[in-house]
Image (cartoon, rainbow, N blue to C red):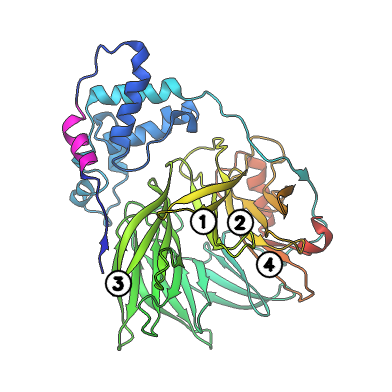
Amino acid sequence: MIARTSLVIAGIFLVIFLGTYPIDGLPKERSKSEGKQLADLYCSACHKPPDPNELEREVWKDHVLPRMGAMMGIEEYSSLKSSWIQEGVFDPIDFENGPFSKEFEISNKDWKQLVDYYIDNAPSRIGVRSVETDSIRPTLLSFPSMFLSPPSTIHTSFTENGLLFSDINSNALFELDGNLDIVRVLNLPGGIVDLDSSSNSTFLTGIGSFSPTSKASGYVALLDDSNKVNIIIDSLRRPVHTKVTDLDLDFQHELLISEYGKWNGGLSLWSKDEHNTYTRNVIAERSGCLKTDLIDIDNDGDMDIIALFGQGDEGFKIYINQGSLYFDEIWMHRFSPSMGSVGFELLDIDQDDQMEIVYWAGDMADLPYTTKPYQGIYIFEFGSASSLIQTKFWPFPGCYKVIALNLDDQAPLDLVACSFFPDHRYQNPNDLLILFRNGPTTYTKSLNLSAHGRWISMSAGDLDRDGSIELLLGSLLMKEDHNGSLNERWLSNGLPFVLLKDVNQGSLQ
């Protein structure tokens, strides 16, 4: 399969042949304009050029610009570049032909001008931006009796009779009953990050390594009725999502797998032959693919693929189905590389018979904590020519999961979100946000659950079958929490998850 992508050859030509044009002696009043031109010229070769005001000055100076310099051939940062090459994973020659190609190198003169542009125009401090909300205390919290330290939950979901959670530290998938007692434990390598039971089978996605790596240790496995796990596709590069589909309408499923990777990754469609062997058909060969879904964007009766990418060149792409598993690639919406894309849901959130996208951004794992007021929850509508139009935004820094629910029996659907990177530089930051949407009006409530864990995953269900909604929040400990006492408390408690009960019956009202 071939993804027929339109390459911006002219932009690469300019980078190669015009990038070293001398800029010494420019009047000071032109420096900002010239700096922006250089950013547009060089940065656009890899991603959308970021604006200086997106990050604080010290973050640019100490973290982002050194990384940019290493990737653009600045000798001062060559040791940083060498530290990124994983022995036995990347051949240095392949590395030079990939993310550190000489095509993207910059002259020292242009580099100095580019650095000055970002340092001189970046804010020293970015103020906190948040929605107006009523901070409340939960009244119905349930805790498991089991102890796992450090808590390392990376997936949560409800089952017909209980719940599941995956712990990457112990490499185990736990199944619990309605009383939160362990029913069974499946020992699986690499950590389950995604589970798809939309078909008659259950497919498990194992990331292989939670920490950034280019090592191909991920997999997709099939869980049969006897709870036996069979790995059907291996050697994947940090896969994070698997979509079961039948895009060629041959009554045989395909697996649409998103490999986030590190320096490499991809989006691929895996087809099964008569010998039950899966063959990879590449759609996009690049890192950062987070999730896919299907929509008939051109109304021709064939389902097309919508994909969200992070890892530098962030945004939504649509892959137009041309038949016979060939696709045309189009950018729908591009974000800044500082955005920190995490996920999306494709649904009719306004209950108006039109599909929308709920998108959220909150990843900050690559930088020291810094305020990003543009992170949070967005709603996009589909526009003309495969474009997206932003209609709503609620700031919620560190946002890592959003679920659309009907909490008040009214349209449109309400939203619940958790934050994996709440700003612990401030006392008692809220890490759970609830948006009650009543027609054109939205009122919000927020909770601080950080005493119990750090929430990277969340799912909704009805565990006790009483008609109310429960939220299952999974906790994962990371060393960067900007509050040592919280780390100690999470280690001591060893809580892999908490269950927030009766969300739509009064506990959050």
Disc 2, SS: strand
* Quarter of the view holding residue 26: top left
Are the two marked residues, 2 and 1, in contact with CB atoms closer than 8 angstroms? yes
Mark 1 Cα shell of 10 Å, populated few (<14), some (14-19), many (≥20):
many
Q: Nearer the viewer, residue 234 or 331?
A: 331
Disc 1 to disc 3, C-alpha distance? 24 Å
Residue under numbered circle 2: 402
Percent position of residue 426, x then y: 67, 35
Which sits in the foreground, 74 or 82?
A: 74
Give me the disc on residue 280: 3
Callout 4: SS: loop
Amino acid on which disc 1 is placed: Gly
Task: Estimate the spatial distance between the alpha carbons at disc 4 and disc 2, rounded to whole Å.
Answer: 27 Å
Residue contact at pointers 4 and 2, CB within 8 angstroms:
no
Name the side, left or right, on which 415 lies relative to 282.
right
Q: Which mark is residue 343?
A: 1
Query: Is 200 located above or below residue 83 in the figure?
Result: below
What is the C-alpha distance between the residues marked 4 and 1?
30 Å
Q: Amino acid at mark 2?
A: Val
Q: Callout 2: 10 Å neighbours few (<14), some, many (20+)?
A: many
Q: Which mark is residue 457?
A: none
Give the residue displayed 41% in from the left and 35% down from the top: 50
> Going from the N terminus, do you reach mark 3 or mark 4 first?
4
